[in-house]
Amino acid sequence: MTDAPSFREPAAAQAAGYVLAIAAALVALGLVFHPMPSGGFEEKPSVLSATPLWGPIHVAIALGFVLCSLGALLMMFAGGAVLRRWESAASWGAMFVGMIFFEGVALINGYVMHALAPRAQAGSDRPLYDAFDRLLIGYGWMGNPLFLAGLTGIAYLEVRYATFGVPRRAAWFGLVMACLSWLRGVGSATGLYFLEPFIYANVPAFLWLGWYGLRIASLARRSATVS
């Protein structure tokens, strides 16, 4: 492996890295203030009503998800070391497609569920609330596993091949956090609700992704200088 991996489009890789760093910061900030899940994927009006920042939290997360999908798209466009292995191409592609769906979950939560929760809790507009609740669950099923598969794949490939020269301990940290991030969904889907607090494993997982993006941006800048 070279000190400065090659990119077909170094400027795209540099932009992708910075975008991923901003995305990770927004998502991590939102998740820090996110209330604990309570028994499944359905959003409960009582939880929303008791969380005044529910809207801003999910708007911040939604913005981060949108930027994450943009960062993944730019990474695929950058090519070179990013797409040298099919597993890497599949991982970045999964992140891109997964986030397109997953950002819908945060957008619905931030702009729709927050406004409907007081009326749903009072007994009015409950069918409308339930319809949007099922929609965001569907978006979640389409998006979250794909995104996590992409993130896990990227971290695994860094552990296995050191594509971008990440120190081994840091690469393992990313892989472990990515794997732990699966547990909230597993817990909510299977009824093992004691696993739901692992939603907060997403905070270090996203921060690792942001740091990884900054590293790629630095390497892309060096690659452009060398070429």
Image (spheres, rainbow, N blue to C red):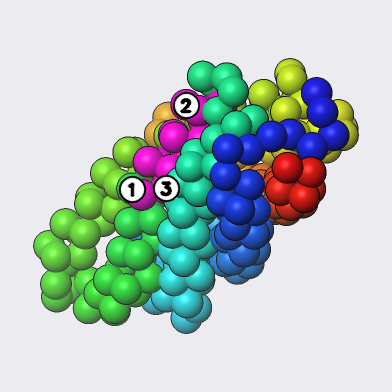
Residue at the disc numbered 3:
99
Residue 198 visible in the snapshot: yes
Q: Quadrant for the C terminus, please.
A: top right
**Gap in Å between the C-alphas at discs 2 and 3?**
14 Å
Query: Tag 2, which secondary structure?
Result: helix
Residue at 55%, 28% (x, y): give it. 83
Provide residue 105's location: percent of width, then percent of height.
35, 56
- Of badges 2 and 3, the one in the foreground is 2
Label 2 or label 3, whichever comes before in sequence order: 2
Q: Residue 90 — which label?
A: 2
Residue at 38%, 70% (x, y): give it. 110
**Gap in Å between the C-alphas at discs 1 and 3?**
5 Å
Judged by its main secondary structure, the magenta piece is helix
Residue at the disc numbered 1:
101
Provide residue 29's location: percent of width, then percent of height.
63, 67
Provide residue 207's location: percent of width, then percent of height.
70, 53
**First to last magenta residue range:** 88-100
Q: Quadrant for the N terminus, please.
A: top right
Q: Is residue 31 left or right of residue 222?
A: left
Q: Is residue 77 within the magenta segment?
A: no
Provide residue 219's location: percent of width, then percent of height.
76, 45
**Amino acid type of the residue tagged 3 in the rendering:** Met
Front one among 55 and 45: 55
**Gap in Å between the C-alphas at discs 1 and 2?**
17 Å
Query: Tag 1, which secondary structure?
Result: helix
Front one among 227 and 81: 227
